[in-house]
Amino acid sequence: MNRSKDLPVYRLLVETLQRGFKVLDSKVQQEIVTFIHSQQNKKGAFSDRAGNPDLYYSLFGLWLSLATKQTTLTNKLKGFLLTVEQEKQGPVEQMALALIEAELLPGDQQKSIFSLLQMLNRQGKNISSSYRFFLFALLVDAVGKNKAFYYFIGRIWLWFYQPENDFSCSLLAALTYVRKMLGLKVEKSQQQLLQFALESGGFKAFENTGNSDMLSTAVALFVLKETAADLRIIAPATLEFVQANYFEGAFLSGDSDETKDLEYTFYGLLALGSLVEDK
């Protein structure tokens, strides 16, 4: 049964992570749980690659904690939220904070589309426009007021929007999912997205890129799965790519960078969960 219409998108992400986590053997599961625990500091925030507390990485820490049922971690993160001064945060951090609060501090968390657009357009952490756009779509879905108005404007915007020729796999994936959210046709976008898949496994970031990476692979698989694309042809090689980039409790970026972090561990489990059949 398709539950996409019944759950906020971020909860679908968590359920996909959980599917990926459950197919792993108990030893690997424990390695991942140990790694997630190691990334939370004493105040409850999760750390970035430099070991500093970071709201963006705390969002991934939250989703991974929910998927692996680590309630002690989510309780500590909830305590950390009470110390955060929102007005001092950049746009990506504010969007991450709002998504964390939607799960841990539910209640009157609704925000106007105008305030969400302000977050989207402010200058801050250097994160691609496609990922910022995806975070914005998640926010509107989770805490936005007047969603009907947003969907009306979104349909008009997508009708005229034409990405540049060398657009990324992650941007196309984000746009495809937004089309699904708005009730628009996705078949053409699905086929374009599948062109980023490599025979050797995984998805590449750009058309002229030779290698796969975990971010592109994860977001492409999640969107293709949620839009009911047939993944059977690409699944075996892509599964090998995901497995090859697991290392000591974490998933790596797939582009030869051996740094372990929460973000790519999220992508690894998301990719794996997207390849698992629903039961």
Image (cartoon, rainbow, N blue to C red):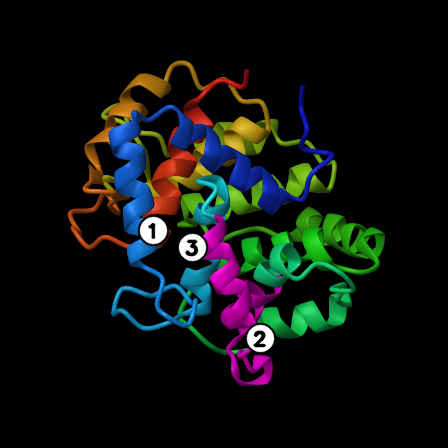
Residue 268 is at least partly visible in this image: yes
Q: CA distance from mark 2 to mark 3?
A: 17 Å
Does the magenta portion include 93?
yes
Residue 277: x and y, percent? Answer: 49, 17
Does the magenta portion include 210?
no
Which of the two discs, 2 and 3, labels the residue nearer the N terminus? Answer: 3
Q: Do the numbered discs 1 and 3 sit on residues whose CB atoms are within 8 Å?
A: yes
The residue lying at 67 percent from left, 24 percent from top is: 2
Q: Which residues are magenta?
A: 71-98
The residue lying at 43 percent from left, 37 percent from top is: 270
Q: Do the numbered discs 1 and 2 sit on residues whose CB atoms are within 8 Å?
A: no
Q: Is residue 13 above or below residue 167?
A: above
Please name the amino acid that badge 1 sits on.
Ile
Numbered disc 1: secondary structure: helix
Residue projecting furthest to the front: 72
Residue on which disc 3 sits: 61
The residue lying at 67 percent from left, 49 percent from top is: 158
Residue 116: x and y, percent? Answer: 68, 68
Numbered disc 3: secondary structure: helix
Please name the amino acid that badge 3 sits on.
Gly
Residue 128 is at least partly visible in this image: no
Which of the two discs, 1 and 2, labels the residue nearer the N terminus? Answer: 1
Query: Residue 199 has which mark?
Result: none
Residue 48: x and y, percent? Answer: 32, 65
Residue on which disc 2 sits: 82
In front of the other: 196 or 227: 227
Q: Quadrant of the N terminus?
A: top right
Label 3, residues with CA under 10 Å away: few <14, some 14-19, many ≥20:
many
Q: CA distance from mark 1 to mark 2?
A: 21 Å
Residue on which disc 1 sits: 36
